[in-house]
Image (cartoon, rainbow, N blue to C red):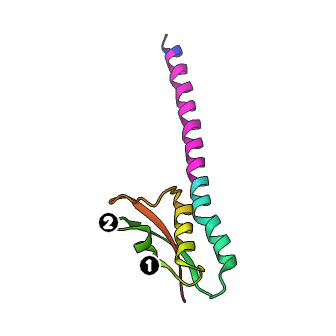
Amino acid sequence: MSTARTLKNNNSHITFGKLAAIVLFMVALFLIVLFVLPERSAAAGNTTGGTYTITSVQIKEGDSLWSLAEQYYTEEYSSVSEYITEIKRMNGLTSDVLFAGNYILLPHFITE
């Protein structure tokens, strides 16, 4: 009877290990897509020699996409409106509503 119990525990352990590996792989893939791919595409269009960076900012009461864009906007974008569109795209936003306490990713260029 103890042999059957040991086999059952070994099977659940193997399943948990496979599940952990799959979750780890998916998290790694998500991070690569989130941070590596946008940097490559933005760097290709960068003609000023600045470094493309992404900053995570905690939204405060009264913040809006426009107020954040005014703080982080750089001339590599053709307009503040285009910059706001890029912020919404990279954060998966479908509206202009922001909630205090949440975090938002803001792309911008740092001149070297």
Residue type highlighted by circle 2:
Lys
Gap in Å between the C-alphas at discs 2 and 1?
Answer: 15 Å
Q: Crowding near pointer 2: few (<14 within 10 Å), some, many (20+)?
A: few
- In this view, 23 is above or below 7: below
Q: Give the residue at x 44% y 63%.
A: 104
Q: Crowding near pointer 1: few (<14 within 10 Å), some, many (20+)?
A: few
Over which residues does the magenta segment extend?
A: 5-28
Q: Nearer the viewer, residue 65 or 29?
A: 65
Q: Residue furthest right?
A: 44
Q: Nearer the viewer, residue 54 or 79?
A: 79
Image quarter for residue 103?
bottom left
Q: Is residue 19 magenta?
A: yes
Q: Give the residue at x 37% y 65%.
A: 58
Disc number for residue 106: none
Residue 66 at x, y percent in the picture: 44, 72
Is 56 left, or right, of 109 in this rendering? Answer: left
* Secondary structure state at the residue bearing disc 2: loop
- In this view, 58 is above or below 76: above
- In this view, 36 is above or below 7: below
Image quarter for residue 50?
bottom right
Which is closer to the viewer, label 2 or label 1? 1
Q: Nearer the viewer, residue 82 or 4?
A: 82
Residue type highlighted by circle 1:
Glu
Q: Earlier in the sequence, mark 2 or mark 1?
A: 2
Residue 100 at x, y percent in the picture: 33, 60
Q: Is residue 93 magenta?
A: no
**Residue for badge 2:** 60
Q: Are marks 2 and 1 in contact (CB under 8 Å)?
A: no
**Residue for badge 1:** 70
Is 68 left, or right, of 82 in this rendering? Answer: left
Residue 45 at x, y percent in the picture: 68, 78
